[in-house]
Image (tube, rainbow, N blue to C red):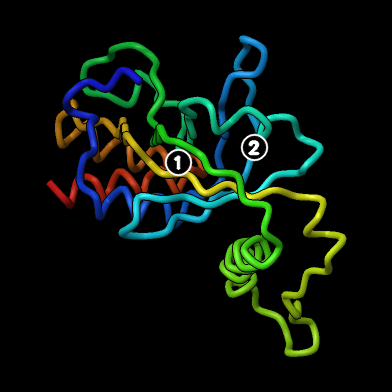
Amino acid sequence: MFIPAPFSVEDNATIADFLKYNSFGLLVSIIDGRPFATPLPFYYLENTQHLECHLAKANPQWKSITEQEILITIQGAHDYISPTWYENKGVPTWNYQMLHLYGKATVITDEQRLAKMVGTLSQKYEAGRQVSESEKWDGKYNEKMLKAIVGLDIEITEIQCKFKLSQNKSETDQTRVIAELKNANSPRLAKEMEKQRNAN
């Protein structure tokens, strides 16, 4: 990924925080000489440089994945930026957060390990739901379900992180862009811009 210096993110804590709240992405590998992508939720094992995920056993991607380098792309907040929002009008652009993770995958078929993997991922998102005790999911998977999937343990070998959040613009321009994004109902990107500006 092309990353101009102002937009490069190398702080491990920032990247880990990004992965915590943006865990849905694309798993990309090569099948028969062509790129093949599967949209998946990932679980980041902090301080280990590993990701976990699972996919349907019917999906052909897992069959050759251990033989190659893979790419995972994860997108964060993003939106259009109008040139009219700057003091000196420039060109239309797009602000965004993007993470590319390169790595090597190990296929997991052991049912106990699979149950733990999918359980951990499910619990992460079930924990955020406000439901009554009777509506809570019991977190159990039967043998038939587990036989229909395979897990992937992905060792991250390279991280490329890019936050293009108007860092190359003046403070006045950044303030105006944040305000316009809030007016345009894009509060998530506005919040990320404020966080980035306050960190510098």
Marker count (numbered): 2
Residue at point 39%, 15% (across, down): 92
Nearest the camera: 61 or 22? 61
Above or below for 86 versus 50:
above
Across and down, in percent, residue 186 comes to 48, 43
Q: Is residue 98 visible?
A: no
Percent coordinates x, y for residue 101 in the rendering: 40, 35
> Can you tell which mark lies on residue 196?
none
What amino acid is at disc 2? Answer: Pro
The residue positioned 51% from the left and 55% from the top of the image is 43
Q: Is residue 65 left or right of residue 74?
A: right
The location of residue 199, given as percent across then percent down, is 16, 51
Amino acid carrying mark 1 in the image:
Ala
Q: In the picture provided, is 74 more to the left or to the right than 171?
A: right
- At mark 1, the secondary structure is strand
Earlier-in-chain disc, 2 versus 1: 2
Q: Nearer the viewer, mark 2 or mark 1?
A: 2
Left of 142 or right of it: where is 30? left
In percent of width and height, residue 65 lies at 58, 31
Q: Residue at x 62, y 63 (%)?
A: 113
Numbered badge on residue 39: 2
